[in-house]
Amino acid sequence: MEQQYLTVTALTKYLKRKFEADPYLERVYLTGEISNFRMRANAHQYFSLKDDQAKIAAIMFKGAFQKLKFTPKEGMKVLVVGRISLYEASGNYQIYVEHMEPDGVGALYQALAEMKEKLSEEGLFTAEKQPLVPYPRKIAVITSPSGAVIRDIMTTLKRRYPIAQLILYPTLVQGDKAADDVCRNIGRVESRGDIDTLIIARGGGSIEDLWPFNEERVARAIFEAKTPIISSVGHETDVTIADLVADVRAATPTAAAELAVPVLSDELLKIKERENRLIKSYSYQVNRQKQRHQHVMNSFIFKQPQRLYEGFSVKLDLMMRTFQQNSHRLVADKKEWYQIINHQLRLVTPINRVSSQSQQLGMLQQQLTNEMLQLIKEKNKQFGQVTQSLDLLSPLKTMGRGYTYVTDEEKLVASAKNLVAGEALTIHFVDGEADMTINKIRINESEETNG
């Protein structure tokens, strides 16, 4: 019988079918320790679950992971629910986790602790709180329209401060949609701009019931609100994140209403007491001023007003005498100083110096004139001597004694050796010129050249 060989793919598909068809593997409940976990933002999560003896690969798809109310961490012991299947590409089996929660501690408590830690590090709990308006005109309440919470608040406000206007924003306070509804109504209150105080309230319940008030988006909406917020969620022992972020926390809805408004009758009594104190104080001031006025009217100033300025008159007279004496002495001192300075100026007056310098200037001008005339005379004499010397050296003077010179086309002929028979030349006399032609040349060395 011929053996039939399977491909790896066929075998893997067969095993995968076995895994998926096994009713015990369709829904598996496992407990184990998370291993090889690395957070992938907005993606599927891949990790392992292990105990002391074995390890299994795990995958949790993005949609299921986003529903977790805590952040998985390396080494955390968890409870998971999922199905077992085979990954054909590698031939490894793995668990596809559909739900996960911490083992030993409830998931909501774990998520609540992590959220408190995160928001505390950001400073949402320790930031400066807004003060409540002492006498609010409009109070908004975010709560369920039915139930004891809104009735308690309405009863308390009517009893304590009936002049305040109460505005109810019907809100879901439990369930998956409650957090979004709370945030939306906070936004509506903020958009009005005329609300003095906002109360967020609901009755007690389990941590699941109160969970919308532990949501991060609700905490941030409360923190960013400009309207002072009083949070009263659950009973006195229930402390939600909304309570920690709000400006004021109230143990009960009734306490929240009491914190929001004063007691009108007490305030009216305070106003009456202050009115009486003001009237008494005003009466006391009026009486005191009357007494002062009467005292002033009885003083000598109004009966004998001249006594008011007698002392000043005497003082003024003394000051005038002192002024006159000082003025006379000052004028005398200045006159004496003027005479001294005038005498000193006369001694150093520039008139004598100007006269002396003028005489010296005249002598210098006469001396300059004489020296200039002597210099001109000497220069004229020198000029005559130089002119006579130049005249003696003048070639015209020499030519006047019978000398001439010969040129060839305005070039001086200085030697007989430069002449050529038959050449036309010009002979220059002292009183004119003459053209000539060379017929014969005789050199002093008894050498002749014929043309």
Image (cartoon, grey):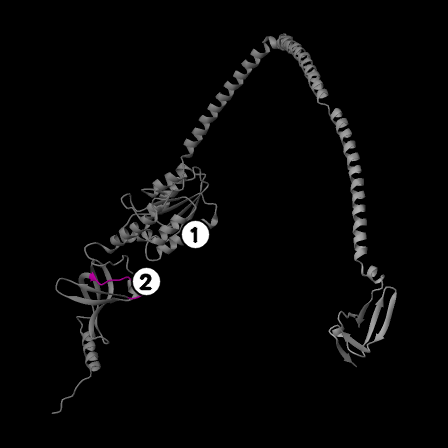
Q: Secondary structure at mark 2?
A: loop
Q: Which mark is residue 431?
A: none
Vertical side of 1 occupied by 60: above or below: above
| Cβ atoms under marks 1 and 2 closer than 8 Å | no
Vertical side of 100 occupied by 17: above or below: below
* Magenta stretch: includes residue 288: no
Left or right side of 91 for 340: right
Residue at coordinates 83% horizontally, 64% vertically from top-left? 403
Residue at coordinates 35% horizontally, 50% vertically from top-left? 219
Is 49 in front, or is 366?
366
The image quadrant where one finds the N terminus is bottom left
Q: Position of residue 226 (x, y in %)?
A: 43, 46
Mark 1 is on which residue type? Gly
Is 150 in front, or is 301?
301
**Mark 1 residue crowding within 10 angstroms, few (<14) / some (14–19) / many (20+):** some
The image quadrant where one finds the C terminus is bottom right
Q: In this picture, which residue range is highlighted in magenta? A: 34-44
Q: Main secondary structure of the magenta part?
A: loop
Q: Position of residue 158 (x, y in %)?
A: 41, 39
Residue receiving disc 1: 187
Residue at coordinates 79% horizontally, 57% vertically from top-left? 393
Visible in this render: residue 78? yes
Q: Within the image, what quadrant is residue 301 found in?
A: top right
> Residue most toward the right?
431
Left or right side of 355 for 290: left
Q: Which mark is residue 41?
A: 2
Q: Secondary structure at mark 1?
A: helix
C-alpha span from label 1 to label 2: 29 Å
* Magenta stretch: includes residue 42: yes
Of labels 1 and 2, the one closer to you = 2
Q: How many marks?
A: 2
Mark 2 is on which residue type? Ala
